[in-house]
């Protein structure tokens, strides 16, 4: 016998991956330049020069056994020290290297954090909608229940009334993602203060910590305002981070879980983090990537092209009659489906070779996600198709 649940997950891709694969096949038929693939958040900017230079220096000058050998299960100490120093430099953060666990990207970070917190089939973890669809898969993989708020479609902030309703005595954590995938929204300091107050109130009511999991792969990609540091608002914050977007390295799979000073039961929680990593087989993150970060954890790619793409696409689509909120970060536009049905709208768009991800999987029906981390030419070539699409729907 095999697991029916695992079979179900493995035999059908996520909507995002399905579109990505569809686009590759369509390109063989009509030509890559005629497929306007906005499905996958695959960074189009190159990694910073420092990254490549550091990688080459390590590969040329260090013994292969040292470059490619195992590190400590939780990560090389020099790497964790460099990450802690970077967070201290950016935010004045107080995080010990001994409370950082290096991972294979944000997916591993989140799975580890969820498994470290869940202890009963009655437990639940609450996501603020819209949310990354794999949260549900990751949470349910622990045996816990996945819950989500109603989306705030005015600003894509937090619907606090809905969040309050979702939290109960079995809630182990609330997860937020900002800048947000799929909306690009950035939570304000006022919203974070309100969130912290609500979580403190609920934790006091139920007599147990409710952790805030901050999923931060887009942390450095902001346009008008830098992303706030969540532990400044709520000490019981677990940071899950990936360098996939900040360094344009999605295929290299490197990130971390960090427990700032002040987190409740920090020693036991870190031990549980290490235990979760061990149980899941997420030990010894890629050694070469760790060595590069140990030398410079603060480098980032040049994100200026994302701002230019955002401005071009937002201005063009709103001028055509599409409705969306201007993103403050990440590299996604979350557009309201003109016909109110995101799935039907994205299927109609496919007929014009425009690949858009319906918002239903993000917990926000009626919207589609456009990933604008592409070359500018693709956006420019797509605009006549977007114009034709909205004329058809009208």
Image (cartoon, rainbow, N blue to C red):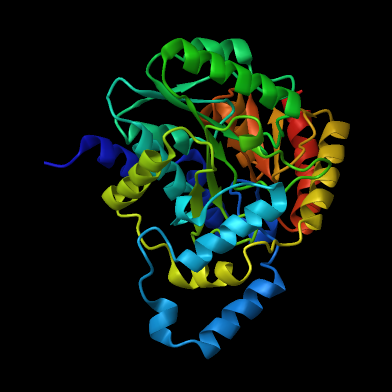
Q: Position of residue 46 (x, y in %)?
A: 68, 67
Residue 19 visible in the snapshot: no
What residue is rendered at 62% in x and 58% in y? 85
Q: Position of residue 339 (x, y in %)?
A: 68, 21
Residue 9 visible in the snapshot: yes
What residue is rendered at 64% in x and 47% in y? 93
Front residue (pair 390, 81) = 81
Q: Where is residue 366 in the image (x, y as percent from the top left)?
A: 63, 22
Q: In this view, does 379 lie above or below 165?
A: below
Front residue (pair 1, 59) = 59
The quadrant of the image that shows the C terminus is top right
Q: Residue furthest left?
A: 1
Front residue (pair 111, 137) = 111
Q: Position of residue 45 (x, y in %)?
A: 70, 62
Q: Quadrant of residue 335?
A: top right
| Left or right of 279, for residue 159 | right
| Left or right of 229, for residue 290 | left
Q: Is residue 21 above or below residue 234?
A: below
């Amino acid at each position: 016998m095999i697991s029916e649940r695992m079979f179900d997950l493995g035999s059908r891709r996520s909507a995002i991956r399905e579109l990505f694969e569809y686009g590759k096949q369509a390109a063989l038929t009509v030509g890559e330049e005629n497929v306007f693939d906005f499905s996958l958040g695959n960074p189009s900017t190159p990694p910073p020069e420092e990254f490549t230079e550091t990688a080459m220096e390590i590969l040329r000058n260090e013994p292969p056994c040292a470059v490619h050998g195992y590190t400590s299960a939780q990560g090389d100490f020099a790497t964790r020290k460099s990450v802690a120093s970077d967070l201290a430099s950016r935010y004045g953060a107080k995080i010990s290297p001994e409370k950082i666990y290096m991972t294979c990207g944000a997916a591993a970070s989140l799975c580890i954090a969820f498994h470290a917190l869940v202890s009963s089939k009655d437990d639940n973890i609450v996501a603020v909608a819209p949310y990354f669809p794999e949260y549900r898969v990751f949470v349910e993989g622990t045996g816990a229940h996945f819950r989500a708020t109603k989306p705030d479609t005015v600003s894509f902030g937090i619907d606090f009334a809905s969040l309050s309703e979702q939290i109960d005595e079995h809630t182990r954590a609330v997860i937020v993602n900002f800048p947000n995938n799929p909306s690009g929204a950035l939570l304000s300091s006022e919203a974070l203060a309100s969130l912290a107050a609500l979580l403190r109130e609920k934790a006091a009511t139920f007599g147990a910590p409710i952790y805030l999991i901050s999923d931060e792969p887009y942390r450095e990609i902001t346009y008008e305002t830098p992303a706030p540091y969540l532990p400044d608002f709520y000490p019981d914050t677990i940071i899950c981070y990936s360098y996939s977007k900040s360094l344009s390295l999605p295929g290299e799979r490197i990130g971390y879980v960090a427990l700032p000073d002040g987190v409740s039961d920090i020693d036991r929680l870190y031990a549980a983090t290490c235990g979760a990593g061990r149980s899941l087989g997420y030990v010894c993150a890629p050694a070469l990537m760790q060595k590069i970060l140990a030398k410079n954890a603060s480098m980032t790619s040049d994100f200026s092209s994302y701002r230019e793409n955002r401005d071009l696409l937002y201005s063009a689509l709103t001028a055509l009659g599409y409705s969306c909120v201007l993103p403050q970060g990440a590299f996604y536009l979350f557009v309201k489906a003109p016909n109110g049905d995101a799935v039907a709208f994205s299927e109609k768009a496919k007929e014009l070779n425009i690949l858009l991800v319906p918002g239903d999987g993000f917990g926000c029906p009626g919207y589609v996600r456009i990933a604008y981390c592409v070359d500018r030419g693709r956006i420019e070539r797509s605009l006549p198709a977007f114009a034709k699409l909205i004329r058809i729907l009208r």
